[in-house]
Amino acid sequence: MLEPYKYKEKLEAGCDEAGRGCIAGPVFASAVILPKDFHHPLLNDSKQISKKARETLRTIIEREAISWSVAKINPKEIDQINILNASFKAMHKAIGKLQMVPEILLIDGNRFNQYKDLPFECIIKGDGKYLSIAAASVLAKTYRDDYMEKLHEEYPVYQWAKNKGFPTKIHRAAIRKYGSSPLHRSSFRLL
């Protein structure tokens, strides 16, 4: 069971990213501030729940969150600044788009670059511990998946509608056969 918050008296924003391990497409991040009494039995780390559950939760989170946002960093910039820095930058953009300033950030993972003067805590596997981080993981993943499905229409040979840009056998076979696209991350090992 996920915890509703870490600090009862503070306005917390949970932050997470999606697409770090992909070889194509942007990295997405989300920041979510939930009401302290928010609860939904389906909400968990986005990797642990079905696509249908994620879609259901996305609508609920967007409707019931105090504030939420999603941001992305494109492959070209990922190649310039590296994926870790791109993940931090996407989170910074998402935090900056929130309609209110949180008092503390709960970051999924073990590293983060401070955003402005906001205090933060890194929480390993935080998307499986706190509702706000789980909500951010759901938004980041659903927005990224939707984006990759749209890109699939432009580049169907890579099967992005199925693999979402992850380095599957079919994806790598397509790169071998057709070469890479402008949306592949050239700093990653594509083959």
Image (tube, helix red, strand yellow):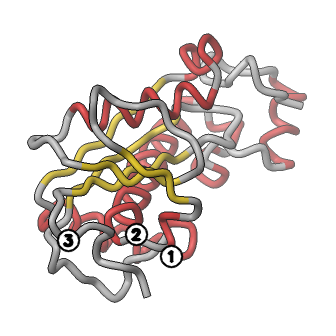
Q: Amino acid at mark 3?
A: Lys
Q: Tell me the CA gap for discs 2 and 1.
A: 6 Å
Asked if residue 3 is positioned above or below residue 165 in the image, the reply reads below
Asked if residue 101 is positioned above or below residue 137 in the image, the reply reads above
Residue closer to the observer: 147 or 79 = 79
Q: Quadrant of the C terminus?
A: top right
Residue 78 pos. (x, y %): 59, 21
Outermost residue toward the top? 80
Residue 124 pos. (x, y %): 58, 60
Residue closer to the observer: 35 or 57 = 35
At a point 36% along the width and 79% down the height, the residue shown is 3
The residue carrying mark 1 is 50
Q: Amino acid at mark 2?
A: Arg
Tell me, yes or no, whether the two marked residues, 3 and 1, touch with CB atoms within 8 Å.
no
Neighbour class for label 1 at 10 Å: few (<14), some, many (≥20)?
few
The residue carrying mark 2 is 54
The residue carrying mark 3 is 8
Neighbour class for label 3 at 10 Å: few (<14), some, many (≥20)?
few
Determine whether, in the image, residue 122 is placed left or right of residue 133.
right
Q: Earlier in the sequence, mark 3 or mark 1?
A: 3
Residue closer to the observer: 106 or 91 = 106
Tell me, yes or no, whether the two marked residues, 2 and 1, touch with CB atoms within 8 Å.
yes
Q: Amino acid at mark 1?
A: Ser
Q: Earlier in the sequence, mark 3 or mark 2?
A: 3
At a point 30% along the width and 37% down the height, the residue shown is 94
Q: Quadrant of residue 150?
A: top left
Q: Tell me the CA gap for discs 3 and 2.
A: 26 Å
Tell me the element at label 2.
helix
